[in-house]
Image: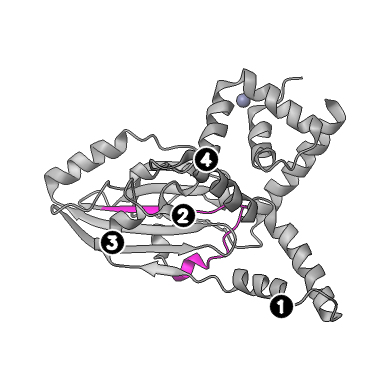
Amino acid sequence: MKIACEIIRDLLPLYAEDMVSEKSKEAVEEHLEECEDCKAFYQRMMAPEPSVQFDVEEAKSFQSFVKKKKWSFGCKVALLSVALVMFLVLLRGALLGGAIGLLVQDMVSAKVEVDTDASHYSQYMGEQAGENYRSKCGMEERIFPKEIRADMSVEDYKMVYYNPWDPQYLSYLVVEYDAETYRQECARLASYSVGDYVGNYGVTGFDGQYQLLAMDADPYYGFVYALTDGESKIIYVEIIFCNYFMDLDYEEYIDKSYLPLGFDASSGNPYRKKMLATVTKVKRQIMVTV
Ligand SMILES: [Zn+2]
């Protein structure tokens, strides 16, 4: 049975977490064998952190340890259920004591990291970036400049990182360029196509005062893009998260005019409900038809 790419892509996050039925799994694998596009999409989704030269076995076991520890896709629902059960158990004063309580507290107390010092740029962006900032869910970060050069006048910069259970990134960089460098930068950005982004997370477009130069949009992971005022200023933004919503209160950290119009990644956003319903529906369909 031939299943539409869109359906397969909706299922991939669940597939990657081994949270699909055997039948769905077979359907996804069959499709990935035949469809180069989806295969590439999946590989990009699963792209590992670029590794440094050290003991591969050790790195692997560490990675699997981290993966096991990490609460990723589907975790919100699972976590809520688990938290509720634990809460009830704790409430009953049963055997589950301090350790689990501490674990829950640890997750809830994750701090929002904010850095506005542009001289720290390379700690968060590009190949020199620290461990937590290197791959950012495989989103196209090269839309951002490789580094802050002397001929760039940084007007505003902020890097926000929050990881209560899944990493969430909100960064922006606003640069004033001289005429020649502005032209070059626009040309560089033109090599990144403006991907289809309208509709993702309720987005309808951008504030009329800015033009969109480049956009990498992912229906699951969010957006990386560059805007310009059409004269000398370029605004680079990335909003990366998963599970169809952000725990981070992003509007607190970024000028609203830099955000896409209609963007809603709050926990109750309608896009999330729609996508989760689609995943469930598709799963059911596949179970019935395959
Ligand atoms: Zn496909």
Residue 57: mark in rendering: 4
Looking at the rendered structure, the kind of residue marked 3 is His
Residue under numbered circle 3: 120
> Is residue 91 inside the magenta stretch?
no
Q: Verify whether residue 240 appears in magenta.
A: yes
Q: Secondary structure at mark 4?
A: helix
**Circle number at residue 182:** none
Q: Residues within 10 Å of mark 2 (few under 14, many from 20)?
A: many
Q: Nearer the viewer, mark 1 or mark 3?
A: 1
Which amino acid, mark 2?
A: Ile
Q: Secondary structure at mark 3?
A: helix
Amino acid type indicated by mark 4: Glu
For the residues labelled 4 and 2, the Cα–Cα distance comes to 33 Å
Callout in the foreground (2, 1): 1
- Observer-side mark, 4 or 1, equals 4
Residue extent of the magenta highlight: 234-252
Which residue is disc 1 drawn over?
98
Q: Which percent across, then down, holds residue 202?
A: 57, 52
- CB within 8 Å, label 4 to label 2: no
Q: Which residue is mark 2?
A: 239
* Rendered residue at 39%/65% (across/down): 255
The image position of residue 214, as x and y in percent, is 36, 41
Alpha carbon distance from label 1 to label 3: 38 Å
Q: Is residue 255 visible?
A: yes
Q: Are marks 3 and 2 in contact (CB under 8 Å)?
A: no
